[in-house]
Image (cartoon, rainbow, N blue to C red):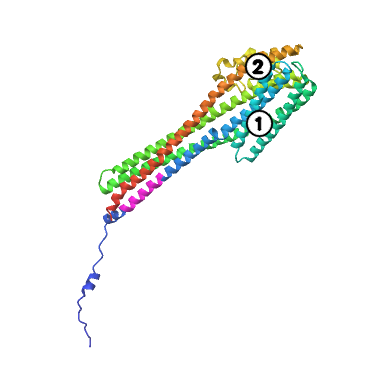
């Protein structure tokens, strides 16, 4: 017997569970993804802004480091050590002049001794400045300490030679042999030990300046390219965000986003411009300032040293040939002219009359008369040597202390004028670069920070509509 189950009526719960789920349309999917897209675009904009700020910071930091080394650290140290070379060489020149004067030329002897004391003070101060600027470089400080120790030995020897010279009471010209023996020790110490060490200090510091210039200039150029790329990326992302908001919400462009765009573009362009200006300042400070100041300082130091060789030439006949060759080598390093001896050099220089090679060539455009004072100095040297060669020692000494000294002073004054002009350019260029970087950091962080706030303010009202 088959039992038939009676039909059952579904319960309300069963009926509700049997109703199919509603279909989610593509329109609903797009609508719910809008906040995510807005957040993504906004995050990308803020990240790009942060990258832009970081590139500005790194770029300005590299530029400031270059200006610091060239304008405030190693650059002044190089100039100080070049001044040290001048002070040391002039100390020995004044000692040679005093010994040459003997018991005559009382006022000039007193003036030469006073100049010796001034140069000694300047040399000591230059060494102290160089020691402070060499902070963190033990090798360089050791070299400076060695020069200080050697300078102390030189002063003792020079003082002994001057005392013996006074006691001898000799006439102007060659002093007694016992005076020469002590002076030879002093001048050999100066020429063969102290001056080369002072010159090496200049070279070492100059190498630091040149390396820093090359490294920081390359870094600034690279960061400027990155800054331009980041600025384009930020601008493109902000425009994309504005267009998306306008299309998704069917509203006009947000004023806050427009202002953020303007601030970002202005800050970025100003940053590129300032870094470009700083790059030019670094190059100008190195080329037109540091290099020119150093060249002029070296020329003055070498000129002073060859002027001392003239006194040594008369002072020590046994070494006259050595001092004459030293004079010729130094003269040709200043202004090159063909000639295997001093007479031939004088003749070539008088015939040519141009400054085309040598340390003085780069600065000739800044000197009136194409260094006519240098040529007059060399002409006076020729007359002095002619007197000495003919046995007229007193007349040669008089020529050295009168005409030759006056022509050298005129030549040295020209170099001082040129050096002051270059130093003014150097200081002005470094100050301009520092000022531009200072102005950048008074503007850029605030502008980019305000842009980030404005972007958030422009996007937040749209996101609130989905809460």
270 lies above or below 359 = below
The nearer-to-camera label among 1 and 2 is: 2
Residue range highlighted in magenta: 34-49
Whether residue 202 is visible: no
Q: Is residue 47 above or below residue 330?
A: below
Q: Quadrant of residue 96?
A: top right
Most common secondary structure along the magenta stretch:
helix
Q: Residue at x 50, y 31 (%)?
A: 430
Q: Secondary structure at mark 1?
A: helix
Residue 113 place in picture, x, y as percent? 68, 22
Residue 282 falls left or right of residue 157: left
In this figure, which residue is indicated by the disc labeled 2? 405
Q: Is 147 left or right of 439, judged from the image as shown?
A: right
* Residue 226, position as x, y percentages in the image: 45, 40
Q: Earlier in the sequence, mark 1 or mark 2?
A: 1
Q: Which mark is residue 349?
A: none
Q: Is residue 313 magenta?
A: no
From the top left corner, tell me how far across and down residue 13 is, in percent: 23, 73
Q: Which label was assigned to residue 198? A: 1
Residue 382, quarter of picture: top right
Q: Residue at x 73, y 24 (%)?
A: 162
């Amino acid at each position: 017997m088959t039992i038939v189950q009676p039909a059952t009526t579904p319960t309300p719960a069963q009926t509700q569970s049997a109703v199919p789920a509603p279909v989610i349309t593509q329109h609903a999917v797009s609508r719910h993804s809008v906040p995510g897209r807005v957040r993504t675009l906004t995050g990308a904009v803020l990240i790009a802004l942060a990258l832009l700020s970081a590139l500005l910071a790194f770029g300005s930091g590299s530029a400031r480091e270059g200006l610091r080394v060239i304008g405030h650290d190693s650059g002044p140290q190089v100039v100080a050590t070049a001044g040290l070379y001048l002070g040391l060489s002039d100390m020995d020149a004044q000692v040679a002049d005093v010994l040459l004067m003997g018991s005559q030329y009382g006022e000039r002897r007193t003036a030469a001794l006073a100049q010796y004391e001034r140069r000694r003070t300047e040399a000591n101060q230059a060494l102290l400045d160089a020691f402070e600027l060499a902070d963190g470089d033990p090798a360089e400080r050791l070299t400076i300490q060695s020069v200080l120790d050697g300078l102390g030995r030189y002063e003792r020897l020079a003082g002994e030679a001057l005392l013996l010279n006074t006691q001898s009471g000799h006439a102007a010209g060659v002093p007694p042999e016992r005076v020469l023996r002590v002076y030879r020790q002093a001048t050999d110490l100066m020429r063969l030990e102290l001056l080369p060490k002072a010159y090496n200090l200049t070279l070492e510091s100059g190498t630091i300046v040149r390396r820093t210039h090359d490294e920081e200039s390359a870094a600034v150029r690279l960061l400027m390219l990155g800054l331009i790329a980041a600025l384009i990326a930020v601008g493109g992302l902000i425009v994309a965000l504005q267009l998306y908001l306008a299309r998704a919400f069917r509203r006009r462009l947000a004023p806050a986003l427009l202002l953020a765009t303007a601030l970002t573009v202005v800050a970025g362009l100003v940053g590129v411009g300032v870094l470009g200006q700083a790059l030019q300042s670094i190059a100008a400070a190195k080329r037109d300032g540091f290099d020119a100041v150093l060249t002029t300082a070296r020329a003055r130091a070498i000129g002073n040293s060859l002027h001392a060789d003239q006194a040594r030439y008369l002072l020590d006949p046994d070494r006259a040939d050595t001092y004459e060759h030293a004079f010729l080598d130094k003269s040709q390093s200043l202004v090159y002219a063909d000639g295997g001896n001093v007479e031939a050099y004088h003749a070539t220089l008088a015939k040519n009359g141009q400054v085309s090679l040598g340390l003085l060539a780069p600065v000739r455009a800044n000197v009136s008369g194409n260094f006519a004072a240098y040529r007059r100095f060399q002409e006076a040297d020729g007359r002095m040597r002619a007197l000495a060669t003919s046995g007229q020692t007193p007349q040669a000494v008089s020529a050295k202390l009168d005409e030759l000294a006056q022509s050298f002073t005129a030549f040295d004054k020209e170099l001082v004028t040129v050096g002051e002009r270059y130093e003014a350019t150097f200081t002005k260029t470094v100050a301009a670069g520092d000022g531009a970087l200072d102005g950048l950091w008074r503007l850029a962080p605030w502008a980019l920070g305000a842009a980030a706030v404005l972007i958030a303010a422009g996007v937040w009202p749209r996101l609130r509509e989905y809460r």
